[in-house]
Image: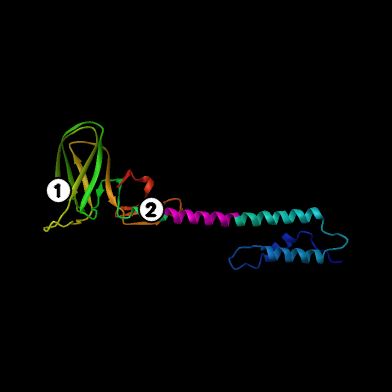
Amino acid sequence: MTTVTNDFVSQYQKKTESVPSANSKESLGQASFLKLMTAQLKFQDPFKPVENKDMVAQMAQFSQVAGISEMNASLKAIAGSFGTSRLAEAANFIGRSVLQDGDTAYADAQGRYAGEFNLANPASNVSLEWLDGAGNVVHTQEMGNLQAGRVPFQLVSEDDNGNPANIGPLKVRLKGASASTVSTWLPVTAVESSSTGADALLVTPAGSFSASSARRIS
């Protein structure tokens, strides 16, 4: 007498161990499951029929797995929707500037290099040097006596005709005082999605940053 196992899910999995599916994952669709269950009932041993409780348990197991797969697909769709929404919202920042920690400034469309630093204590005879990529001082701003707190700075670059001139990134160096923090304004040129999809990134000449990491947005 031929004995047919009552565990038709396990039987199907054994059959598929050596036959990979198109997406290289062993999977059991609803139609295949019902077809296999019907065949199992048809060819079962009449002296050892499938117990109702076993059938119900295996159907419940399949339903649970199928439900998890559907839930994962739904969550991925929702995450994708959130990512698209965040990207669309972040696109509103293109053409604006973000204040980011760092001592290197980049020109905006008007040729302005700007930023700010914070002083924990008052200082006298303070000056701010602007250095090019080779480390040469291209401009020095005399700032005089300063009170403790936030101090903004700015340099406007123009050509001989008074048009905005981008002379590349400029590093700022403070003399006569010690700043607790230095930040520069960075123009936002584009947006991109993050690797995790949790937050859209603002693309600037200094790199990509999340909007939440910026001190201010102008």
Secondary structure under the numbered disc 2 in the rendered image: helix
Residue lying at the far right in this picture: please name it. Answer: 47
User: Is 75 in the magenta?
Assistant: yes
The residue under label 2 is: 90
Q: Residue at x 59, y 68 (%)?
A: 22
Q: What secondary structure is marked by label 1?
A: strand
Q: Taking the image as drawn, is residue 216 in sight?
A: yes
- Along the viewing direction, whichever of 88 and 117 lies nearer the viewer: 88
| Range shown magenta | 71-86
Tag 1: amino acid: His
Residue at 82% x, 64% y is: 44
| Residue placed most toward the observer, 29 or 110 | 110
Counting from the top left corner in percent of width and height, residue 98 is at: 31, 48
Examine the structure image and report whether residue 198 is included in the region drawn in magenta.
no
- Of callouts 2 and 1, which one flags the residue occurring earlier in the amino acid sequence? 2
Magenta stretch: helix, strand or loop mostly: helix
Q: Is residue 107 above or below residue 12?
A: above
Q: Quadrant of the N terminus?
A: bottom right
Q: Position of residue 108 (x, y in %)?
A: 24, 53
User: What is the distance, in whole Å, between disc 2 and disc 1 at their CAs?
Assistant: 35 Å
> Residue 25 has which mark?
none
